[in-house]
């Protein structure tokens, strides 16, 4: 079998230092209040990339993060240790794991297909792209929503929220994606 070509159909990102978009376009006030900034940005870029590509639900949601939801992780650990005046909130725990982003996107989109998060500091993005590329080129899936999300912290110098829709369909594509490599391989 000849591997299929893989195309980038849409890209949406929020660059570090940019103001937040109007999340009310896609989230209710209650949802926006409960979600951390990184989760809101991740969901917003994902929805916008899907809209640009004309895809309602992708076959897969594949995310990458070098450090995960640090803000929520720090809040949870501080509350656990008893630092500060704020009581322990379950939402900080629920939103502190690296796969929270991918899960939120999949649940909200109704995507019941392949869902994975890569958290390999320095190789997360390339790993996610290679996974999506491989599955599409082998014919296992036709579309993949791939995202890279991190928030500014002591470990991460800038915010990053980027989503792209990859597809086996060339119609309307921005460009053909070459096989991604990890660490020069």
Image (cartoon, rainbow, N blue to C red):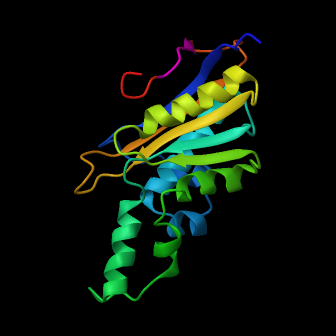
Q: Is residue 84 magenta?
A: no
Residue closer to the observer: 65 or 160: 65
Q: Position of residue 1 (x, y in %)?
A: 77, 12
The span shown in magenta is: 176-180
Residue appearing at x 54%, y 48% in the figure: 117
Q: Position of residue 22 (x, y in %)?
A: 50, 49
Q: 179 left or right of 144? A: left
Q: Is residue 138 visible?
A: yes
Q: Quadrant of the C terminus?
A: top left
Numbered marks: total: 0
Would you say the magenta stretch is mainly helix, strand or loop? loop
Q: 18 left or right of 49? A: left
Q: 148 left or right of 17? A: right
Q: Position of residue 135 (x, y in %)?
A: 67, 29
Quadrant for residue 55, please give it: top right
Residue appearing at x 56%, y 49% in the figure: 43
Residue appearing at x 77%, y 49% in the figure: 112
Quadrant for residue 18, please give it: top left
Q: Position of residue 21 (x, y in %)?
A: 47, 46
Q: 58 left or right of 179? A: right
Quadrant for residue 72, please give it: bottom left
89 relative to 42, above or below: below
175 relative to 106, above or below: above
Q: Is residue 179 magenta?
A: yes
Residue closer to the observer: 158 or 183: 183
Residue appearing at x 72%, y 12% in the figure: 171
Q: Is residue 163 visible?
A: no
38 relative to 113, above or below: below
């Amino acid at each position: 079998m000849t591997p299929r070509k893989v195309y980038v159909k849409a890209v949406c990102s929020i660059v570090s230092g940019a103001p937040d978009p109007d999340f009310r376009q896609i989230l209710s006030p209650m949802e926006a209040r409960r979600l951390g900034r990184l989760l809101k940005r991740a969901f917003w870029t994902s929805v916008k990339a899907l809209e640009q590509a004309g895809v309602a639900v992708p076959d897969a949601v594949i995310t990458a993060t070098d450090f995960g939801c640090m803000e929520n992780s720090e809040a949870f650990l501080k509350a656990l240790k008893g630092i500060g005046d704020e009581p322990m909130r379950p939402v900080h725990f629920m939103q502190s794991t690296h796969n929270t982003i991918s899960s939120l996107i999949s649940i909200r989109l109704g995507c019941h297909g392949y869902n994975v998060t890569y958290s390999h500091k320095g190789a997360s993005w390339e790993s996610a792209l290679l996974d999506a590329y491989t599955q599409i080129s082998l014919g296992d899936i036709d579309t993949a929503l791939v995202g890279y999300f991190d928030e500014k912290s002591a470990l991460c110098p800038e915010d990053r929220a980027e989503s792209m829709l990859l597809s086996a369909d060339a119609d309307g594509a921005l460009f053909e994606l070459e096989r991604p490599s990890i660490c020069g391989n």
